[in-house]
Amino acid sequence: MTSSSFSSGAESVASASKIRTSIAGVPVAELAQRFGTPTFVYDAATIGERIASLACFDVVRYAQKACSNIAVLDLCRRSGALVDATSAGEINRALLAGFAAVGDPPPIVYTADIFDSDSLDMVAAQRIHVNCGSADMIDQLADRVAAPHVTLRINPGFGHGHSRKTNTGGEQSKHGIWHEELEDVLARARARGAVVSGVHVHIGSGSDIEHLGEVCGALERLALRVGDQVTTVSAGGGLPVAYRRGEASMDVPAYFALWDAARRRLEKAFGHSVRLEIEPGRYLVAESGYLVAQVRAIKRMGANLFYLLDAGFNNLARPVMYGAYHPMALAPADENPARGLREVVVGGPLCESGDIFTQDEGGVVRHEFLPEARVGDHLVIEIAGAYGFSMSSNYNSKPLAAEVLIRDGTPHLIRARQSLADLVRGEVIPAPVAD
């Protein structure tokens, strides 16, 4: 692992110069020439390694909201992971990727705070297991499915995450069933013939190990309140990913030991086995992903030198939303990568001042030391596999980027770049109103 990158394929990054020549063994120039820019590139090996690192848990359930391409879902399935879905669209993606609708453990779990009409129809038709974030979901499901077994997502009264916008616990969060209302919700479930067989707690994305440990204790107490009908507990997700040098990586054995001890105490209290699930999203895919863009303009604005790319927050929204940091490296177009470092601001093509990749939370622009660039060079934004493409938009009528999966040294196009025709598909100009 080099000092300029926490992602796989780091053998191709010169740590002092922040030059990247390849991704997972494939030259950046070749990827850009073949697939164009901007393009998301994923290293399949990294995803497999992250899933394998969590094999101590009984079930690794991928939170596909992080990166939901069906090729990524297929890779997760083949690597032994199950899947979490938050919409009818995500259930459909999981089915297309080869996940069965029902099984033990459930291959697909629908987790949300509401049912919209499409998701309720699909859950009922496919008999998808549901992780209910509100009591109203229990009533709505019981109207369609007889005696359903459900999991309850419970808000333990506290939360944590890398940003206030990713904090999913506490009274400022809309997520989950408030812990003080648990007994009322259990009575409501019994009245509707529903069986609460699982308990799930998730407090936020990017939580540190201390706060994740607090979740363990909270869930144990909540499961005891639910009672011995519980057969599954879920540690949720939120596992930290190191985007900067010196940031803590996940100590999986220590984290599992906490949960395993809690699970064993529950088994003793209930008199039967309890399945232990974990539900990572970002942890599985973030380090696998790279956004490859081209430098299209270089200009100075007072004291600031700007590198302007053909990718913007329409492709990667995390910096503008959270002030998220992503390591970057230059891929020179020529074969002489010797470049001096410059203190620069990196931005995109959109008509917003916030279209800056180098910014802190609150929109404060910061500088990044990067090699001297020339128009036509490529810039690689790293650790971009989570909440990159999945949060993309067509703002400024920009087409969605292509997606490429590198497996065993071979790049595969897993999503074609959107065309201009795709952008207006389904739009209609109504016929003029007659005078």
Image (cartoon, helix red, strand yellow):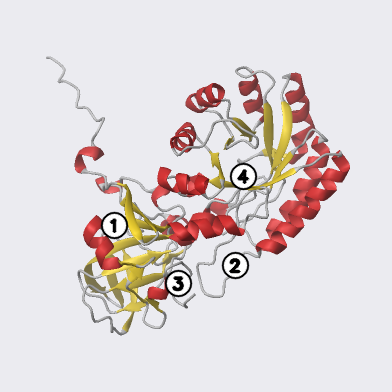
First in sequence, mark 1 or 2: give its number.
Answer: 1
Q: CA distance from mark 1 to mark 4?
A: 34 Å
Q: Residue 269, located in which quarter of the rendered image?
A: top right
Residue at disc 3, secondary structure: loop
First in sequence, mark 2 or 3: give its number.
Answer: 3
Disc 1 residue type (three-letter): Pro
For the image, the number of numbered tags is 4
What residue is rendered at 63% in x and 35% in y? 131
- Viewer-proximal residue among 15 and 352: 15
Residue at disc 4, secondary structure: loop
* Within-10-Å neighbours for mark 1: few <14, some 14–19, many 20+: many
First in sequence, mark 1 or 3: give its number.
Answer: 3
Give the answer, above or below, for where 374 lies relative to 73: below
* Within-10-Å neighbours for mark 4: few <14, some 14–19, many 20+: some
370 horizontally vs 163: left or right: left
Disc 2 residue type (three-letter): Ser
> Given contact means CB atoms under 8 Å apart, are the residues at marks 4 and 2 in contact?
no
> Given contact means CB atoms under 8 Å apart, are the residues at marks 1 and 3 in contact?
no
Quadrant showing the C terminus: top left
Q: Residue 184, located in which quarter of the rendered image?
A: top right
* Within-10-Å neighbours for mark 2: few <14, some 14–19, many 20+: few
Name the residue carrying label 2. 249
Disc 3 residue type (three-letter): Ser
Q: CA distance from mark 1 to mark 3?
A: 20 Å
Give the answer, above or below, for where 82 lies relative to 336: above
Disc 4 residue type (three-letter): Ser
- Find residue 38 and name its label: 1
Residue at disc 2, secondary structure: loop
Q: Which is in the foreground here, disc 1 or disc 4? A: 1
Q: CA distance from mark 2 to mark 3?
A: 14 Å
